[in-house]
Amino acid sequence: MISFPMLDQLPVGRRRCLLIAPLSFYTFHKSLSYGLEKKGFVVDVINDEFPDNVLGKILGKIFIPLLRKLTLWGLHARLGGQPPYDLVLIIKGRGLGVESLAYLRTKALNLIGYNFDSFLFNPSPLDWQHLTDRYATFDIQDAKKYGLPLVHLFSDIKSTPAVVRDFDISIIQRIHSNRLVLVGQLLRALPTSVRAFIFLYEKNIFTFALGVLRFPIHYARLWPYISFRPLSHTQAMQALGRSRVTFDFAHPLQSGITIRCFEAQSLGVAIYTNNPEVIESGLFSHSGVACFSGCSDSKALVAMCLDLMKHIPAQRCRSIEEFLDELLFIGAPIAPSTFNIGRVLS
């Protein structure tokens, strides 16, 4: 087993890191690249599944064995001839399998994995997570069940809160599971005087078609707010920072705290969530969080949300540096240096 503080002892500017992560998950891989650069790494980036397109995403949902073979081929094609990296950091790794981990071991002096999904939602790492030197999860129940290190997510917001809070509530969400149903119920129940910023992102035409079949009335009602193009991170955070409360909906198969909660906390925005772990974690001000999970009384739900709008919680930013220190098990942060980072291997 590798002693991870060894990473601190490598000369700054000579630490090489391969980041394997979903490249289509907003700006997540860019945030990690930036944080790793501040830790003194030169970073190369590749996707966590191949082919790196819609077909790969479909295979990831319905046919893991074929996806694993294609991803292994993709790793060989992109990493062949590369010397070992000081660190290979795997985020999610849906396309990886035991054979991929065996190959990555030949390319890694330190091999670390992290799941920002639950194993119920992303079961791929279950048969290979033990092959890493360290594997952590954001999912609170998985950490307890499998005895894994729990590493919460982070906020990558560097701006200050908006002076004017011209939205009472912001709903900036990707459509999945029954999220659209709850958004519709909340909007119908809230008074018309409530000022709301609503942006609902539909991932692609396939998820849209399946969603319309399941919830045709809700898609019709919320159609003015649905977009097939996501907001930029800057636009989303500007809208979030201008709101008093934000709606957070954790996937029913996950117990981890979403990035949206940490973003809201860093901007002094209260959180209206279905995840009781947000309160129970002790990471957030109780006056700035309300959990509607298990509550079916619409009047109580509205009263809870309206009361939350009266509170501006204290700011606290859990940074990318804190996240990486816990994930990589590294000690004191290293002074930033200038590198060409984020090179995508193709």
Image: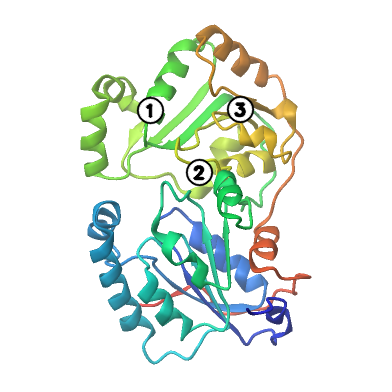
Q: Nearer the viewer, mark 3 or mark 1?
A: 1
Q: Residue at x 67, y 73 (%)?
A: 39
Q: Looking at numbered disc 2 in the image, what kind of residue is underneath it?
A: Gln
- Find residue 235 and name its label: 2
Q: Earlier in the sequence, mark 3 or mark 1?
A: 1
Q: In this rendering, is residue 261 above or below 191?
A: below
Look at mark 1 in the image and give the residue it sits on: 180
Q: Earlier in the sequence, mark 2 or mark 3?
A: 2
- Asked whether the beta carbons under mark 1 and mark 2 sit within 8 Å of each other, the answer is no
Helix, strand or loop for disc 2: helix
- Find residue 140 and name its label: none
Q: Residues within 10 Å of mark 2 (few under 14, many from 20)?
A: few
Q: In this rendering, is residue 331 above or below 61?
A: below
Horizontal side of residue 48 vs 208, given as left or right: right
Image spot of residue 67 (x, y percent): 27, 64
Image spot of residue 26 (x, y percent): 45, 53
Image spot of residue 90 (x, y percent): 49, 67
Looking at this view, name the residue that lies furthest to the top.
299
Q: Looking at the image, which is closer to me, 307 or 64?
A: 64
Q: Is residue 133 visible?
A: yes
Q: Looking at the image, which is closer to me, 341 or 254?
A: 254
Viewport quadrant of the N terminus = bottom right
Helix, strand or loop for disc 1: helix
Q: Residue at x 50, y 36 (%)?
A: 250
Disc 2 and disc 3: Cα gap in Å?
Answer: 17 Å
Look at mark 3 in the image and give the residue it sits on: 245
Image spot of residue 76 (x, y percent): 33, 82
Horizontal side of residue 254 vs 217, given as left or right: right
